[in-house]
Image: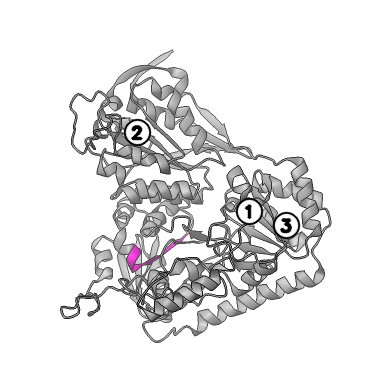
Amino acid sequence: MKKRLTVAQATIEFLKNQYVERDGVEQPFFAGCFGIFGHGNVAGLGQALQEHPDFRYYQCRNEQSMVHTAVAYAKVKNRLSAFVCTTSIGPGATNMLTGAALATINRLPVLLLPGDIFATREPAPVLQQLESAQTQDISVNDCFKPVSKYWDRINRPEQLIFALPEVMRVLTSPAETGTVTLSMPQDVQTHAYDFPAALFEKRVWHIPRARPDRNALEKAAEWIRAAKKPVIVAGGGAIYSAASEILDAFATKTGIPVGETFAGKGATPYNAPYNIGGLGATGTKYAIDVANEADLVVGIGTRYSDFTTASKSIFKNPGVRFININVNEFDSYKHNALALTGDAKVTLEELQALLGSHEVEADYRKRIAEINKAWDDEVTEIYATGNGSNPPIDQAVVIGTLNSFMNPEDIMINASGSAPGDLHKLWRATHPKNFHLEYGYSTMGYEIAAGLGAKMAAPEREIYVICGDGGYLMNNNEIVTAIQEGIRFTIVLINNNGFASIGGLSESIGSERFGTKYLYREETSGQLSGDILPVDLAKNAESLGAVVIKATDAASLQKGLEEARKQNRVTVVYIETHLHRTVKGYHAWWEVPVAEVSQSASVQKAFETYKENKKQQRIFL
């Protein structure tokens, strides 16, 4: 049997009938489509979406942020549900590039359907077309190739029959998921074809739980039994595979301490006696000590970014070995590891069975429990003593006030600025979704769009977005979308009149915060060193439709959060913080190159420090 549809109609008809199943639980894969229409998709995908109200369309304000919204949704859903994003050709399409890179780097599924130039080439060059003297088989959509896990262009209707199953194969693959880009020439979108009816039947994609090689598992168990000071590095894969319960049981039984990456924080409760908190360049001082001494590192669902490994300087034990549990073979072999290529949940279950009654030595277990309590006591002190009553207050006080105010099931979102480092150290995560950090790409402007996506994914939970002034100015558009959709969440807008994170980094390399403050340019010096700019971010948020509550200290912030919880739409709690006072870093390093030659004494000094730190760096072969 055949079904005569346009390419755009066939695409939507196919997508709405795709389901996924893991562990016997079945659900539709796509939650709908975010889109902004133009001449590249209004007559094709726009018309198709109009005919399919059961495949809900959401009107967004910015192409980049709608991808961020889709990514946050997929993150909360553990990659078992996703969104489609469609745009016109040209700038509408390329505005999605940042979001596409973010999704692929973070291994989160999103389907992009950017409009494209005419396949016939008859009216070329069309509006917004990139011309090339070397080939006519190119458009700006080719820019998506390096940031997509699968990329295709539909130049003929029948190609869709073979492209769409590949789209789903990649999106639902635990190992290969990320951005999938299906470029759709604007003329081809409107072309009709007699598609086989079987293409549109309900299809359920089973999400497998791959198991590692048995011999490798047995060898891993031997290594763990032999280790005196093992440590687990919990990454995002531990959460996406829903391995938190077995990880808790595994660590409780064996006594092996668990350090957390940004993506993995919350994989185990902050107050579990084996939890040593954030690990890496922005980690706790105790977690860094444990990593320095570790003779065995068990990575679970981590890709070992430079923040996690402190630029390959944190694992100092000369005899350190690595076991990597990862569904992605590429990651499981990193650091010359014993690779357990498989799903985190089932791999831990099988590894625990092999280990039987094995536990670390009692003294090591006792020390780790003491570390957990000592760091929690220090967090309490930092939250309480950070200039909470003398504006502008410390950022740590804002974080502590919010952390204490939130219910255990709530979700906190952040991505950029100085807050991620403070949060990695301080945040007391209560469940696997409580701590929502996008730090694979650390994208300024992710936060507010992500608040929308997270609330769509978990409408029963309160969502709190921590957003700095820099990130807010880069991307606040989806406040309007949230107002339109009646979706409420709370934004804690922190203003310190500058780029605090990069300012601190600039200072550390001797560049004295050059170009990182929001200041007027002085006529005499020609430098950006005048008075603070009179920008009112609170009024701006109010103009977009948000309820705005101003706070100045911990007490008024607490009151503002209480008021925000009562509102029926997006609420911004605005507070100013001190630009320079952030939580100190500990004895871990993050490599940022320093100029070898400079007239500045501070840069010269920073370069000498850099050379010393480079000596700590190791290559694991």
Amino acid, disc 2: Ser
Q: Residues within 10 Å of mark 2 (few under 14, many from 20)?
A: many
Q: Nearer the viewer, residue 546 or 110?
A: 110
Element on which disc 3 rests: helix
Q: Nearer the viewer, mark 2 or mark 1?
A: 1
Q: Nearer the viewer, residue 308 or 423?
A: 308
Mark 3, residue position: 249
Q: Which residue ends up furthest to the bottom in the rendered image?
A: 390
Amino acid, disc 1: His
Residue 141 in sight here: yes
Q: Position of residue 45 (x, y in %)?
A: 30, 32
Mark 2, residue position: 183
Residue 33 in sight here: no
- The residue depicted at 39 percent of the width and 51 percent of the height is 68
> Looking at the figure, which quarter contains the N terminus?
top left
Above/below status of 563 relative to 448: below
Span highlighted in magenta in the image: 462-471
Mark 1, residue position: 335
- The quarter of the picture where residue 249 lies is bottom right
Q: Nearer the viewer, mark 3 or mark 1?
A: 1
Prevailing SS of the magenta stretch: strand
- The quarter of the picture where residue 159 lies is top left
Q: Nearer the viewer, residue 443 or 618?
A: 618
- The residue depicted at 30 percent of the width and 47 percent of the height is 95
N-terminal label among 2 and 1? 2
Above/below status of 182 relative to 617: above
Q: CA distance from mark 2 to mark 1?
A: 37 Å
